[in-house]
Amino acid sequence: MNLRTFSQLVFLFLATLAMAAGGEPVYLTIKAVKSAPSRCTAPPTLTILSHADRWHERKGDTWNGENDWEVFFTLTADTANSPPRLAMNCPGVKISRVIVGHTDVKFTASGDGVEFDAVPDRNNGILINNSLPDPSGNGLPIGLYHNWRMRANPDPEGRVRGCGPYNGRPYPMAEARAVNNYLLAAREAFRHMGGMGPRDTRAFDGNIVLLSFEVACGRAHHDFPPHVHIMLYVPGYTPGSQVTHFYMDERGRVVRNSFVELGVKDSKRNGNYGPGDICRMFDLKGNLGVECAVTKEGGIMLRKKPGADEYLLTGDEQAGAAEKVWVVLQGRKLAACASNDDAERGVMTATVKLMEEGKPARTVTQTLRYDPFAGREREQRKP
């Protein structure tokens, strides 16, 4: 499986969950990007100019709305068909871009409005994401959601309702940084374990998937509170894929693991796992993929099986997990993992300091530049 296919699998599961829960089968996100941060002087509107008998606006919390830079709508249809021609009006605002899903489309502007043809890009356009590969080529990619504060708190003055459970709450800046640091540390731990990566010969049938969380809660997926996903995807995805949610406190300390077997009715293993409780993930044949647990210190333990080496992912004692997460094996520090994701500028940096005999031996830094409004990478990644 190549990296592109693997990355697509990582981000497919949210859409699959929505459909399995009885959601509409076809969605389009329609988004206008403003030329400068501002607010519409009256409620924006979307008019369906063609195929109005097939397409309808899906209204509701996180399905449509406005933030400092974006106005967005969601269209739905019963079945896949030709995308419609649309007109969007954003009073008092100059529109610089129109994006359907993650695709820029040509538009004609007139006053406060634009007219354009939609395209069949079904990506959730309010979520900006991509995949960070392992620079060594021997480890797991990381699925990243690029969280921008304004998408969680669209209007600090409360004039615009909605946008999910993060709206009206303190923005989880520390937790968001800690999540990415834990994922970098998990990637290092699995690389040291061996036999866990997408190119490895594995003792189980499936893929280990590392994924962050998102604050925009687009299309009513309330990814709350902040958490780390470490998952085992089985062939066919569902039923049987297994998802951990390592929830944390405001300091970035992991406090519990909410575990789910997707599509498995009456699962005896679903539920909350506290510190020290071992959570096991299996393939469809019963082969063990990985064991994990919340540690009493507020970190994560990973191991292949009982009695195997235990890799501890733990926040820095002084600075905390928001600044640095260590990978520790039998009291020996293997790596220090840190990151910064500037979603407004579209720049993600990830730094891993590899240790030997307790001293820094080598530093690997990755820089990922991406379009803040469409998610596309702006240039080649540089390990």
Image (tube, rainbow, N blue to C red):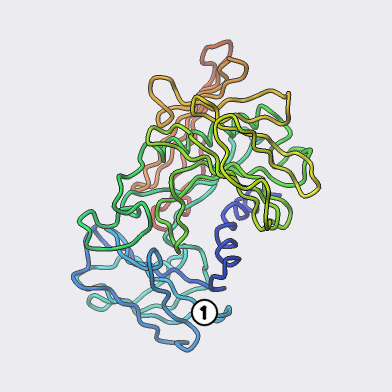
Nearer the observer, 307 or 113: 307
Q: Residue at x 35, y 40 (%)?
A: 173
Q: In this view, does 359 lie above or below 373?
A: above
Q: Going by the image, does 40 lie left or right of 86?
A: left
Give x and y (percent) for residue 190.
Answer: 65, 32
Task: Determine crowd level at label 1: few under 14, some 14-19, many 20+ residues with C-alpha closer than 10 A.
Answer: some
Kind of element beneath mark 1: strand
The part of the image, by quadrant, that contains residue 19 is bottom right
Most distant residue in the right direction: 285
Residue type beneath disc 1 = Ala
Give x and y (percent) for residue 29.
Answer: 44, 68
Nearer the observer, 381 or 227: 227
Q: Residue at x 33, y 49 (%)?
A: 149
Q: Is residue 157 above or below residue 363?
A: below
The part of the image, by quadrant, that contains residue 210 is top right
The residue wearing badge 1 is 77
The part of the image, by quadrant, that contains residue 288 is top right
Give x and y (percent) for residue 205.
Answer: 77, 46
Give x and y (percent) for residue 258.
Answer: 55, 44
Q: Which residue is drawn at 39% across and 78% down?
A: 116
Q: Going by the image, does 114 lie left or right of 25?
A: left
Most distant residue in the bottom direction: 53
Q: Going by the image, does 257 lie left or right of 321?
A: right
Nearer the observer, 11 or 137: 11
